[in-house]
Amino acid sequence: MATGAGVARIALLGNPNTGKSTLFNCLTGLRQKVGNYPGVTVQRKTGRMIYGKNVAEIIDLPGTYSLAADSPDERVVVDALLGEMESVERPDLVLYILDATNLQRNLFLACQTAQLGIPMVVAVNHWDSARRKNIKIDVEALSKTLGVPVVPVSAARAEGITQLKEAVAGALVSKPHMNEVEWPESVESALVMARETLPKPLRAKVSSSVLHRSVFDEDRSFLIRLGASEEQAGKAIEAGRKGLFKGGLNPGNAETVLLYQYIKDRVASSVTSDAAGSVSGSESIDSILTHRVWGLFAFLGLMYVVFQSVYSWAGFPMDIIDGAKGWIQDHIAGWLEPWPMLESLATDGVVEGVGAVFIFLPQILILFFFIALLEDTGYMARAAFLMDKLFSWCGLSGKSFVPLLSSYACAIPGVMAARTIQDPRARMITILLAPFMSCSARLPVYVLLIGAFIEPHYGAAVAGASLFAMHFVGLLVAMPFVYVANRFVLKIPPQPFVLEMPSYQVPKVRDVFMRMYTQGKEFVKNAGTVIFAITIVIWALLYFPRSEELAEQVTNEFVAAAAAEMGVERSEVVQLLEEDEESAAALERKIDSVFVEQSYMGRIGKTLQPAFAWAGFDWKITVGVVASFPAREVIISTLGIIYSLGGDTDEESHDLREMMANQTWPEGERKGQPIFTIPVAFSIMVFFALCQQCGATVAVISQETSWKYGVFSFVFMTSLAWVAAIIVYQVGSLL
């Protein structure tokens, strides 16, 4: 069985779109963990598979088409299989996933893996799809040809899982190895030439599989890690590739040509297909969904439905979360009433911070529900194909589509998803572009302003269209900058875009909800902790300094104004405040509003207000903007406090919308005019659409690249948002 603690380690390996994740979920259920591989930012997904009375650890390796380590994901696959990763032991078994409808192509990676000398079991997935396409596979003949157990499964239907577990259990004992490729003499001679170029002490350390990968992929890292210098590794690889050339082979494609010829000769007899019956409805559907015009319209229509659903469906669960947060704050406030600062820290800091994290979960979960649905049906690959045509003009490929789409829920998973892009410059541009996508944290700002100023004047249809349009502002503004950066700075080479079009299939409900759970958990763990910490910092800046003299002054002014308005003595107003909870709450909100105005955050906002005045912002909006730099959603509660409505105000608050609509300029040329006009509303929304107001995203960008790029993202997006907000307001005011 396995070494170490007695738990077998199984690596789940296969090409993208072979159903690997679905099979992983079938084998492990809810017994999963998500983290990062040590030393790199690639996600590590592991789970426990129970078979009989035993338990095995399954490592879901990133999907890849070959072992040529061109991207971080592919590097992880190679290093994990070779046992070259720190604190990650070499697997005892490889569970390799084949797509029954693309058997020969999928076997390319399997043949490469066979050279590493790890026991293997092959699962032929999408067995039901193969039947529908009249593809017949002789499993016994294929197993004999490969030399390892071959088990037909349909992961989406959970068929064949029991038989697969039995085969895995047997293989952990018998340790079957897949038959290795019989390379021509010219290849063997070339590898000998490469080995002889190395210093004698190194020759014994270098296995044939490592030497093979080094020569075919021109990858020096394997040899360097075994002790070779940069120069020695380069000479060995050069000698091996010259040997291939002398043997009549092209070093650039020799492995690909020879492997596919080997696969065709050995496996073709095990597979038969009825060409006439293999044509499915996918082709007729694709004629529309991948069409350069109709496909784009279909994509935009589908995205509109998705975002309208996020806008509508998330409201009810968000109300429940917000209500629960308010209930907890009320109870804590009652317990800590004798200690005002501690009460404020607990309610406006801790509980508000936790609420700021969980309030976005409904939106994120709904969006990932649709993303999982689109991926599992096979449409996401078609969308990436369409987007490749739109991205190619600025130097990117369709591979950037998934990271950017993921960023519409939260930029953090979007930034992390860019790891699959091979070219480092294209990966960098995609990472810097991800925060421009309109993440769910911007939604409260859009909902507040559209609900307060657009919908009352133009109706629900225009309001929905405005929300839809705001989600594309960042993309439309950022793409020209990507073009300029590619053409004059980074000069990204043309990105080859190889994409498999998976068959359309019915999504598995369990997998969809598993994806929602995983992404929601990752958001709470990664972004949530930063948002919580930032909320505490914002609370401190909004709370301090705070003096009793100021509170007493505000109280005296409030009592005097109320007495004058009511035509009664001041003592009667004081008595009313003691007896009437509503009047006392109004005074407390007034004091809180003045405290915010005099706080460190208020002072910062007033100092910066002249710069934001060009965009139509008054000092209250500016304070809200400054408070929301670490986390966008903070502006709603900040405005609630400033307008004496309380920190528990949300974007659906009728009182907040009415209060904002009634605000007028107190002095200057615009005295008496409304502060919030349509140009101001769009100016604020455009600012939030373009500004990098998320400390968690800056941290993740810095983690994936360096702090230099994290700081650059913040400074560039903030400057761009400021300029764009000014343009929108000034032009809008003229019109």
Image (cartoon, helix red, strand yellow):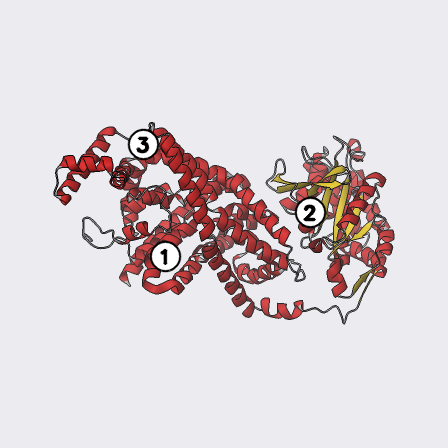
Residue 276 in sight: yes
Front residue of this view, candidates 311 and 614: 311
Amino acid tagged 1 = Ile
**First along the sequence among labels 2 and 3:** 2
Mark 1 = which residue?
450
- Is disc 1 surrounded by few (<14), some (14 to 19) or many (20+) residues within 10 Å? many
Q: CA distance from mark 2 to mark 3?
A: 51 Å
Marks 1/3: CA distance? 33 Å
Q: Secondary structure at mark 3?
A: loop
Q: Which residue is mark 2?
A: 24
| Amino acid on which the number 2 mark rests in the picture | Phe
* Residue found 75% across the figure and 30% down from its top: 4
Q: Position of residue 289 (x, y in %)?
A: 59, 67
Residues tagged 1 and 3 counted as in contact (Cβ below 8 A):
no
In which quadrant is the C terminus drawn? bottom left
Q: Which quarter of the figure is the N terminus placed in?
A: top right
Disc 3 marks which amino acid?
Phe
Element carrying mark 1: helix
Instruction: Give how far across and how far down residue 104 sits, in percent.
Output: 77, 58
Tell me: 435 left or right of 460.
right
